[in-house]
Image (cartoon, helix red, strand yellow):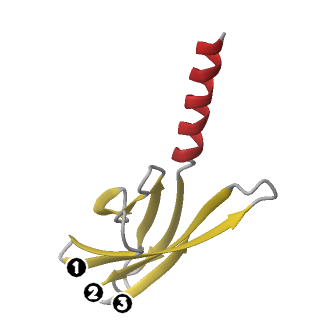
């Protein structure tokens, strides 16, 4: 019984650490005659959350936040255009009534194509 309870606690902790993945998207028009490109940012939940930028379902840029630091910048190319993804992390720490400390992170990811901001995504 103790073994099953310990195993359950480990599994529960892993689920809390991993969290949930989420996706946000926008449309970018490279020119007036274009139907537009679907730009998506996917947050893959992990210990050091990974963000993936896709355009029309092709992975262009993938980056994670460093363990020390609160931002990243990574570049890639799509159809001859420079794609830049900037990420910023805001961490807040709070204590509950039992004195337990909890840290919550929020993220802002900005995507640029040829130095023009396509959109910003808040996670």
From the viewer's perspective, tell me whether residue 97 is left or right of residue 76: right
Earlier in the chain: of badge 1 and badge 2, it is 1
Specify the farthest residue to the front: 99
Q: Give coordinates of residue 73: x percent, y percent.
A: 30, 76
Q: Is residue 48 above or below residue 9?
A: below
* Residue at figure coordinates x 34%, y 86% from the top left: 31
Q: Is residue 9 above or below residue 116?
A: above
How far apart marks 2 and 3 lie (CA) works out to 6 Å
Residue 97 position by quadrant: bottom right
Q: Which residue is disc 3 drawn over?
A: 116
* Residue at figure coordinates x 40%, y 81% from the top left: 29
Pointer 1 with pointer 2, Cβ within 8 A: yes
How far apart marks 1 and 2 lie (CA) works out to 6 Å
Quadrant the C terminus occupies = bottom right
Q: Give coordinates of residue 4: x percent, y percent.
A: 62, 14
Q: Which residue is disc 2 drawn over?
A: 114
Q: Secondary structure at mark 2?
A: loop
* Residue at figure coordinates x 44%, y 64% from the top left: 40
Q: Give coordinates of residue 82: x percent, y percent.
A: 23, 79
Q: Give coordinates of residue 16: x percent, y percent.
A: 59, 44
Pointer 2 with pointer 3, Cβ within 8 A: yes
* Residue at figure coordinates x 37%, y 83% from the top left: 33
Q: Which residue is disc 1 drawn over?
A: 81
Q: Secondary structure at mark 1?
A: strand
Q: Residues within 10 Å of mark 1 (few under 14, many from 20)?
A: few
Q: Residues within 10 Å of mark 3 (few under 14, many from 20)?
A: few
Q: Is residue 103 above or below residue 72?
A: above
How far apart marks 1 and 3 lie (CA) works out to 11 Å
Q: Residues within 10 Å of mark 2 (few under 14, many from 20)?
A: few
């Amino acid at each position: 019984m103790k073994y099953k309870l310990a195993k359950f606690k480990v599994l529960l902790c892993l689920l809390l650490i991993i969290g949930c993945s989420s996706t946000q998207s926008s449309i970018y028009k490279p020119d007036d005659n274009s139907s537009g490109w679907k730009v998506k940012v996917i947050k893959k939940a992990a210990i050091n959350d990974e963000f993936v930028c896709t355009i029309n379902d092709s992975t262009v840029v993938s980056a994670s936040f460093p363990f020390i630091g609160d931002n990243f910048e990574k570049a890639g190319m799509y159809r001859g255009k420079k794609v830049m993804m900037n990420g910023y992390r805001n961490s807040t720490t709070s204590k509950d009534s039992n004195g337990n400390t909890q840290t919550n992170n929020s993220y802002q990811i900005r995507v640029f194509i040829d130095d023009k901001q396509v959109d910003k995504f808040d996670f």
